[in-house]
Structure formats: C-alpha cells, structure tokens
Image (cartoon, rainbow, N blue to C red):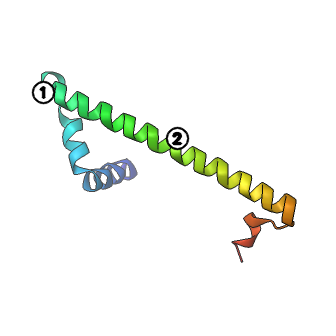
Amino acid sequence: MGTIYRYLHTFEEENPKLVEQMKKQGPNIIPEDYKKLQEEVLRLKCELKREKLRADFYEEMVAFGKEVYGIDLKKAGTK
C-alpha cells in the first residue's frame, strides 16, 4: 500500500493540472473540460503515431546497417 501511495503522491506533484481535472466529478465537469481532454487524447495519439514511425525507422536502419555494412548497431552502442 505504501508504494501505491508514493506513486500517487509523485503523480500529483508532477501533474498538478491533470490531478485537478481528475478531482472534478459528476456535475462539476463542464463541456470545456471534456473538450480539453479530447484535444489531449488527439495530441497524444499523434505523438504515439510519430514515435511508432520513429521506432520502425530505427529498426529498419539497424537491419540495413547489419545487412549492407555488417555492423550490428544494437551492440555498438553498449561499449
């Protein structure tokens, strides 16, 4: 239980605006809050899509480097 409370406390310290929005319940939620959350979801989806493309590109780059140049880039960065 202590670990969970510590996580919650850390989350509250790092995201005070989000915590304030989460504390609103029932009739206290206004359409503006709902619209802000929808915009946040859209932004996060776009960011996730961009990061997936970046990860795919990195994997292809590593495979290309190994195939063409015989360099294993995954191991090269650990030295």
Of the 4 image quadrants, the one containing the C terminus is bottom right
Amino acid type assigned to the residue bearing label 2 in the image? Lys
Question: In which quadrant of the rendered view does residue 65 lie?
Answer: bottom right
Q: Residue at x 29, y 55 (%)?
A: 14
* Residue 70 on image: x %, y %: 87, 66
Name above or below for residue 64 compared with residue 77: above
Q: What distance separates the C-alpha of mark 1 from that of mark 2? A: 33 Å
Q: Could you say where residue 1 lies in the image, as x and y percent from the top left?
A: 37, 47
The answer to which quarter of the image holds residue 43 is top left
In the image shown, does 40 or 14 lie closer to the viewer?
40
Name the residue rendered at 17%, 30% in the picture: 32
Seen at 27% across and 51% down, the residue is: 15
Describe the element under mark 2 as helix, strand or loop: helix
| Most distant residue in the left direction | 28
Mark drawn on residue 28: 1
Query: Relative to residue 16, is residue 27 depicted above or below?
Result: above
Question: Callout 2: few (<14), some (14-19), or many (20+) C-alpha neighbours within 10 Å?
Answer: few
The residue beneath circle 2 is 49
Q: Earlier in the sequence, mark 1 or mark 2?
A: 1
Seen at 73% across and 64% down, the residue is 74
SS of the residue at dot 1? helix
Name the residue furthest bottom: 79
Q: Amino acid at mark 1?
A: Asn
**Which is closer to the viewer, label 1 or label 2?**
2
Q: Is residue 57 above or below residue 68?
A: above
Corner quadrant of residue 24? top left
| Residue 48 located left or right of residue 41 | right
